[in-house]
């Protein structure tokens, strides 16, 4: 008999009932160190006092009004995002996949209104992830996500990761833009090089097409800058944001330049919940913390500490681990043993991690993780890697 919850996930046999900072407490009382943060969502950890206060205060005042009216919390958050980024304007969604939908609509509408209705094609990359809607799965293009779901939204081309010549060759009179994650998350923590992003920006400029960045996972301070593209010194025309911006409350957005957004006039797009008062009350509190320079420099300092310890861990477990990759607190352990075994052994050692493609284990802790917790994480990962080594080695150590 089918489970009452549609069984589209292979869930670990764990049920968490409470969260405190970097810690998740299981129904049986065990305390897990959370290096997944809800897949890069709980940017400020669990039950952060500022977020709890923002949410409960708003909950006592007003939950929802619809976008038929002005929403002051939404305007405040949009102002902050505009002040801190390339963007001139922001549309709020409830998730990354909805942000992807709007980004695709926005660039197509832009070219339509400019008198180039044939410019509808988008170039994307192998190994990418842009969500689970029809546009999202077409954009990512992987067989695993698209198989069986009927005709795909047309207009997407998929090119090898980091291949600028392939991009140049693929651009035609029908190309509307290029969509890319500056650091691939689901694809296995694969950062695009600064050089590649710079060249891609220059190429889009030369060809007069749009650059759309998906920073749903790598944005909101995750890499040690507010947004990952800042490392490369470039700006996009359109950007997808979600995950971290709500700190655990469902919230996403699309940021755009005035030019890129020029087709999106009244009536062209909407959302019942997008940017509602509750979500934006939390989003404002997240933004106030994460956009702070001192907070970001702490993320970078801790990331350096974590990375150094992870490099040492790889050296200690050459049969299980291959290398460390990523940027800031968006880190990946490329494994030699199956990554699922390390995730599993992590559960036994009370540390939660997230698998990704390319046999990588993702480490996406709350950005508020402390040095002591990083040291503790390393001990638990060390234990887990030793368990995997014992499991896989025919010879006893
Ligand atoms: C998670 C993710 C999405 C989809 O976000 P949802 O909120 O799950 O819809 C899109 N793009 C990237 C890069 C992601 O990591």
Image (cartoon, rainbow, N blue to C red):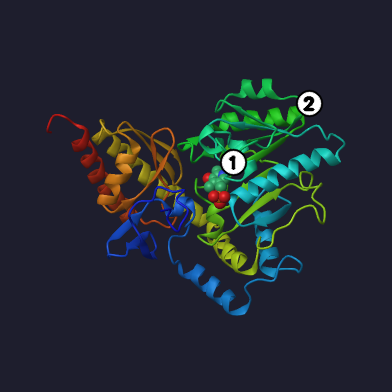
Q: Is the shortest distance between ligand 1 and the CB of mark 2 under 8 Å?
A: no
Q: Nearer the viewer, residue 247 or 344?
A: 344
Q: Is residue 341 visible?
A: yes
Q: Which mark is residue 229?
A: 1
Q: Nearer the viewer, residue 83 or 114?
A: 114
Q: Position of residue 27 (x, y in %)?
A: 31, 65
Q: Can you tell which of label 1 and label 2 is closer to the viewer?
A: 2
Q: Position of residue 317 (x, y in %)?
A: 25, 35
Q: Secondary structure at mark 1?
A: helix
Q: Which mark is residue 173?
A: 2
Horizontal arrangement in the rendering, residue 224 relative to residue 268 (left or right):
left
Q: Quadrant of residue 356?
A: top left
Q: Is residue 309 visible?
A: no
Q: Residue furthest right?
A: 115
Q: Earlier in the sequence, mark 1 or mark 2?
A: 2
Q: For the residues marked 1 and 2, what is the alpha-carbon distance in whole angstroms?
A: 27 Å
**Looking at the image, is 24 positioned above or below residue 221?**
below
Identify the residue shown where x is 52% and y is 51%.
221
Q: Secondary structure at mark 2?
A: loop
Q: Residues within 10 Å of mark 2 (few under 14, many from 20)?
A: few
Identify the residue shown where x is 33% and y is 57%.
14
């Amino acid at each position: 008999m089918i489970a009452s919850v549609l069984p589209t996930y292979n869930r670990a046999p764990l049920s968490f009932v409470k969260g405190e900072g970097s810690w998740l407490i299981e129904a049986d009382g065990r305390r897990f160190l959370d290096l997944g943060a809800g897949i890069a969502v709980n940017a400020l950890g669990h039950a952060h006092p500022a977020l709890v206060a923002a949410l409960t205060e708003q909950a006592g005042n007003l939950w929802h009004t619809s976008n038929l009216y002005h929403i002051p919390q939404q305007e405040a958050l949009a102002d902050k995002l505009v002040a801190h980024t390339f963007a001139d304007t922001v549309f709020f969604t409830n998730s990354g996949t909805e942000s992807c939908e709007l980004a695709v609509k926005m660039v197509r509408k832009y070219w339509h209104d400019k008198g180039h209705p044939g410019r509808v094609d988008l170039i994307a990359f192998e190994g990418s992830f842009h969500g689970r809607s029809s546009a999202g799965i077409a954009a990512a293009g992987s067989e695993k996500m698209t198989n069986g779901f009927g005709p795909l939204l047309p207009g997407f081309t998929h090119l090898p990761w980091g291949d600028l010549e392939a991009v140049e060759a693929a651009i035609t009179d029908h190309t509307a833009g290029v969509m890319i994650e500056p650091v691939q998350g689901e694809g296995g923590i694969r950062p695009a090089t600064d050089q590649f992003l710079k060249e891609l920006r220059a190429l889009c400029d030369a060809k007069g097409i749009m650059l759309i960045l998906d920073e749903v996972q790598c944005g909101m301070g995750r890499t040690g800058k507010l947004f990952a593209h800042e490392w490369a010194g470039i700006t996009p025309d359109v950007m997808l944001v979600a995950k971290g911006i709500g700190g655990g409350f469902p919230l996403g957005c699309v940021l755009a330049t005035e030019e890129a957004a020029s087709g999106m006039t009244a009536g062209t797009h909407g959302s019942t919940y997008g940017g509602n008062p509750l979500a934006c009350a939390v989003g404002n509190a997240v933004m106030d913390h994460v956009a702070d320079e001192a907070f970001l420099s702490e993320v970078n300092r801790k990331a350096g500490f974590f990375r150094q310890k992870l490099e040492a861990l790889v050296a200690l477990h050459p049969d299980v681990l291959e290398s460390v990759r990523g940027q800031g607190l968006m880190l990946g352990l490329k494994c030699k043993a199956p990554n699922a075994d390390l995730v599993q052994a992590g559960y036994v050692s009370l540390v939660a991690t997230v698998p990704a493609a390319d046999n990588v284990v993702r480490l996406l802790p709350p950005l508020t993780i402390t040095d002591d917790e990083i040291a503790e994480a390393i001990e638990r990962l060390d234990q887990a890697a030793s368990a995997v080594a014992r499991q896989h080695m025919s010879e006893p150590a």
